[in-house]
Amino acid sequence: MELDIRAKGFELTAAIEQHIRRRLQFALDWARHGIGRVTVRLSDENGPRGGLDKRCAIVVSLPAQSELVIEDTRDDIYRAIDHAVERLGRNLAKRLARSRAHAKIRPALVLS
């Protein structure tokens, strides 16, 4: 799994990057072989004005499927990361379960 982390509007500290890596590893380790690339974009929408403006957007590339995009905005960047990663884990499990179920339903090709 390839991971790309970027921040806009604030400095991406080693602590934030380590937090993201740890959370993603815990949430996605079970599916690591089915994931191509994970892109994490962090931003501070309002700058020093404060408020609900810390945004975490996660994009997961899946082979032979459309990308899975999860976004969350909170008052704290760590909370935004945590909530986005939790949602990502749930949505990824649903998407992969649906694709497996769909693969089982396909009729076999019969050659005569």
Image: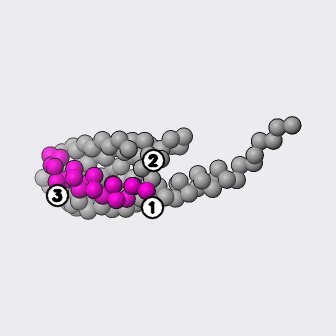
Q: Position of residue 27 (x, y in %)?
A: 37, 59
Q: Position of residue 79 (x, y in %)?
A: 26, 62
The colour style of the image is one colour
3D distance between C-alphas at marks 3 and 1: 29 Å
- Position of 64 with respect to 42 (left or right) is right
Give the residue drawn at x 43%, y 41%: 36
Return the disc, 2 or 3, that comes first in the chain's sequence. Answer: 2
Give the residue drawn at x 50%, y 41%: 63
The residue segment tinted magenta is 10-30
Give the residue drawn at x 37%, y 62%: 86
Frontmost of labels 3 and 1 is 1
- Density class for disc 3 (Cα within 10 Å; few <14, some 14-19, many ≥20) is few
Return the disc, 3 or 1, that comes first in the chain's sequence. Answer: 3
Which amino acid is tagged 2?
A: His
Residue position marked by numbered label 1 in the rendering: 90
* Residue 23 among those drawn in magenta: yes
Residue that extends furthest to the right in the rendered view of this protein = 112
Disc 2, SS: helix
Give the residue drawn at x 52%, y 59%: 94
- Density class for disc 1 (Cα within 10 Å; few <14, some 14-19, many ≥20) is few
Frontmost of labels 2 and 3 is 2
Q: What is the quadrant of residue 83 in the picture?
A: bottom left
Magenta segment, principal secondary structure? helix
* Residue 81 among those drawn in magenta: no
Residue position marked by numbered label 3 in the rendering: 50
Contact between labelled residues 3 and 2, with CB atoms less than 8 Å apart: no
Residue 33: mark: 2
Disc 3, SS: loop
Q: Position of residue 21 (x, y in %)?
A: 28, 52
- Density class for disc 2 (Cα within 10 Å; few <14, some 14-19, many ≥20) is few
